[in-house]
Image (cartoon, rainbow, N blue to C red):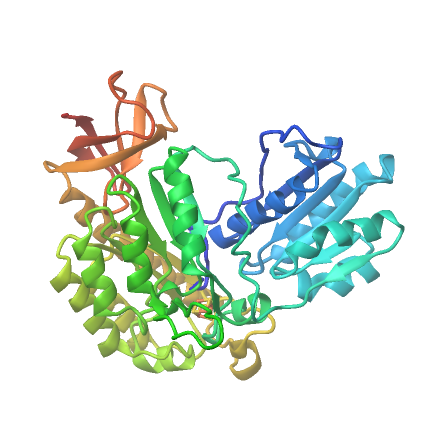
Amino acid sequence: MLDLLHTTKTHDETRQGEAVELAPTGKADGRKLYIESYGCQMNFSDSEIVASILIDQGYETTKDYKQADVVFINTCSIRENAEQRVRNRLKEFEAVKAKNPGLVVGVLGCMAERLKSKFLEEEKLVDVVVGPDAYRDLPNLINKVEDGNKAVNVLLSREETYADISPVRLNSNGVSAFISIMRGCDNMCSFCVVPFTRGRERSRDYASIVKEAQDLYNAGYREVTLLGQNVDSYKYTPKVEEGNDPLPTVNFANLLELVAQVSPELRIRFSTSHPKDITDEVLYTMAKYENICKYIHLPVQSGNSRVLELMNRTYDRQWYMGRVDAIKRIMPDCAISTDIITGFCTETEEEHAETLSMMDYVKYDFAYMFAYSERPGTLAAKRYQDDIPEEIKKRRLTEVVNKQQIHSLERITQYVGKVHKVLIEGFSKRSDKDYCGRNDQNTMVVFPVDARFKVGDYVHVLGESCTSATLIGKIID
Ligand code: SF4
């Protein structure tokens, strides 16, 4: 599930406006593609599909939009002011288009439906608008634009999973990659716009997922993250010829197991879980395989049952605690992170205090924390009044953030003095004398470069000290 802010390395780590450049394919017809992606990892993953579709048509990519023949912004509607940010960026492209009238400018992704009339017809900022299920139509839509028309396809599909498209890895470190296993969401969390922008939930053929994981492993990748808005509800029933016996349905636990069996040297992560759907079967499968990382992102959103009901989360406080108990029972070393919204409609001080006490109960390793802000088109916007004053939302947010800082430090401190298996992902941002990578629990670990090891190797690192976000250590292999 793409809970509120699907902005992670896994789901929740917002990467703002990253441009990507691909290796030239050698069969380009001279046209250059520039894609800028915003928002969640699903969006970045979609940009890889878009790039793949257009590279098949002979495009090359560029990191410089001024050199491009086609410029796309892959939009996210989650963040506040997202629309304004996209508009500002489109104005910059407009200046380039003034000099190069042949430039095709397009908006892709979650904001496409909502902004199509505004950007295309009223403000005339773009030539093409394409929703997340219509990327196969891109070559045709670009042709239409080149014939002098405006082009739109924002139809949502009940079938499209892009299963057969092998994504081009963008900005890749050659070690970690994302594999999209499903699309859309059937949950109707009242604060969330995703069910309206990305449509109904559908699962991708498991065989194409396992093949993609195998291909990545063969190409030297050592970590895959299985992505979906709600991975725990993954369900794929293989199609059989009429007259043949039906084949068993593959659920998420089965899929995890199949991907884990690609190689013990391939690490598996996934995002995002929904507390109502994560099963003991998934937890036991995680426990069974050393290469399935012991880390679960389990968005709680609120610790109070009445607020959870208003949010339409379909679980209550007791249920959530029960799931956390199961995780800790089955995998005592498993890290848990979460999303929290403060000041949701009608939230009282007592209800907010229950969010704080939930944090004390779980002791999250990490959290993405936000003050509630209404999103147009959501159920909450239609049904409830956004009635908590901004200063109260912000004060509650500060309380949540302060508590999380204490818990993050407490959790990471436990890793000091222990040995961690770390996959070297690259050089540390601060110094090329240090490597960085993550341990099983998804904690970033920084340690001095050792010439015996290279990016993509597993090493054992002794944690020697820490900040609240990073473990610092040394290789002891
Ligand atoms: S509706 Fe709920 S489960 Fe679905 S993407 Fe939004 S927050 Fe995640």
Tell how many labels. Answer: 0
As drawn, is 78 to the left or to the right of 436? right
As drawn, is 408 to the left or to the right of 91? left
Query: Where is 189 relative to 394, above or below?
Result: below
Q: Is residue 250 visible?
A: yes
Q: Position of residue 238 (x, y in %)?
A: 43, 67
Q: Position of residue 86 (x, y in %)?
A: 66, 51
Residue nearest the viewer, comparing 349 with 151? 151
Q: Check the image and name the residue furthest to the right.
A: 148
Q: In the figure, residue 424 lies in which quadrant?
A: top left
Q: Position of residue 384 (x, y in %)?
A: 51, 82
Q: Check the image and name the residue furthest to the left.
A: 417
Query: Where does the N terminus fall, quadrant-wise?
Result: bottom left
Q: Position of residue 218 (x, y in %)?
A: 38, 36
Residue nearest the viewer, comparing 466 with 420? 420
Q: Check the image and name the residue furthest to the top.
A: 451
Q: Is residue 298 visible?
A: no
As drawn, is 267 to the left or to the right of 136? left
Query: Where is 464 relative to 305, above or below?
Result: above
As drawn, is 118 to the left or to the right of 243? right
Residue found 24% across the figure and 42% down from its top: 264
Query: Where is 225 relative to 26, above or below?
Result: below
Residue found 41% across the figure and 48% down from its top: 211
Q: In the figure, residue 265 lies in which quadrant?
A: top left
Q: In the figure, residue 344 lies in which quadrant?
A: bottom left
Residue nearest the viewer, comparing 96 with 101? 101
Q: Quadrant of ligand 1?
A: bottom left
Query: Where does the C terminus fall, quadrant-wise?
Result: top left
Q: Check the image and name the residue furthest to the front.
A: 243
